[in-house]
Amino acid sequence: MEIDSYIREQFGLKKKDIRTYSPLTLAYIGDGIFDLIIRTIVVDKGNTSPNELHRHTSSIVKAHTQALMVEALEKELTSEEYDVYRRGRNAKSVTTAKNASVADYRKATGFEALMGYLYLEDKFERAVFLTKRALEILQIEP
């Protein structure tokens, strides 16, 4: 059973049509999912101070790195995945990037929308695969 289905089952939540979610809602949940994947990897690398764990995780989950990751993955995305990414990238957000260019921020939002989409579609395995693949292509050691 995938994570999303398990949580829905435990809390009596009904599955909703993914097409009813805005790209920014997908990005909201996708931000947490991507963060969870990276935190899991970082914590497994060694028991260290929370400050060090946060510093290392933040260097990967920041908008610039996410933008690089999605650029590296574009050719490997299915047409459906690319469409979700594109919709997220093009979504108009009221928030602005703190430490990233507008282009990186938009690409990162698209990447997070894709992660959220995969999670809500019970394709967590695919989200992990794409994360692993991007880390390999970019030679990033979490």
Image (cartoon, rainbow, N blue to C red):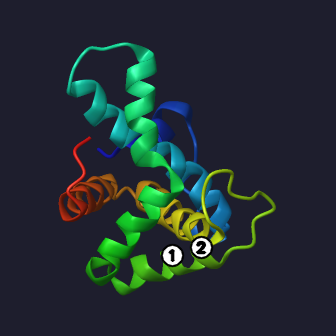
Do we see residue 21 in this rendering? no
Relative depth, front residue between 81 and 86: 86
Q: Which residue is pictured at 25% across the width and 62% down the height?
A: 138
Single out the residue that lies furthest toward the right: 94
Q: Which mark is residue 134?
A: none
Which quarter shows the C terminus?
top left
Mark 2 = which residue? 103
Report, in whole angstroms, how far the alpha carbon at label 1 lies from the one at label 2.
Answer: 17 Å
Which quarter shows the N terminus?
top left
Relative depth, front residue between 78 and 14: 78
Local SS, label 1:
helix
**Is residue 108 depicted above or below 82 in this figure?**
above
Residue 55 percent across, percent down from the top left: 44, 30
The quadrant holding residue 37 is: top left
Say what amino acid the circle numbered 1 marks.
Val
Of mark 1 and mark 2, the one earlier in the sequence is 1
- Badge 2 local density, few (<14 within 10 Å), some, or many (20+)? some
Say what amino acid the circle numbered 2 marks.
Ala
Residue 88 percent across, percent down from the top left: 59, 71
Q: Is residue 34 left or right of residue 127?
A: right
Q: Which residue is pictured at 68% across the width and 74% down the height?
A: 91
Mark 1 = which residue? 84
Local SS, label 2:
helix
